[in-house]
Image (cartoon, rainbow, N blue to C red):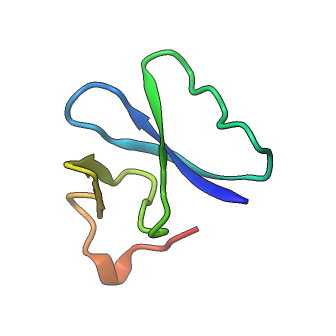
Amino acid sequence: MARFAIVWAEAPQFVSSVIEWYENEVPTPPEGYAMIADTERSAVPGGLYADGTFSWPPDLPPQEATQT
């Protein structure tokens, strides 16, 4: 099982959604998006991805966010 974030491929790179993937092959993202492995389990929908790191949504403090 692997966890992936579906990230908008253009800057700023927003996390569209997060999925758990049970197959061997990495799924193909929709056009205009990238599939990024979330090995740290730190991606959240609405968050950002930059320089190889996921961060919380800009308008939501981490203590109020809910990880799926």
Which residue is at 67% across, 33% downward?
Answer: 27
**For residue 61, what is the image quadrant?**
bottom left
Q: Is residue 43 left or right of residue 25?
A: left
The image shows residue 10 at horizontal and vertical percentages of 27, 25
Toward the viewer: 58 or 36? 36
Q: Residue furthest top?
A: 31
The image shows residue 58 at horizontal and vertical percentages of 20, 58
The image shows residue 36 at horizontal and vertical percentages of 46, 44
Q: Is residue 48 left or right of residue 18?
A: left
Point out the image quarter for the C terminus: bottom right
Question: Does 46 sit above or below residue 65?
Answer: above
- Number of residue marks: 0
Question: Does 45 sit above or below residue 36?
Answer: below
Which residue is at 33% across, 84% downward?
Answer: 63
Toward the viewer: 3 or 67? 3
Point out the image quarter for the N terminus: bottom right
**For residue 59, what is the image quadrant?**
bottom left
Which residue is at 33% across, 54% downward?
Answer: 47
Question: Does 24 sit above or below residue 42?
Answer: above
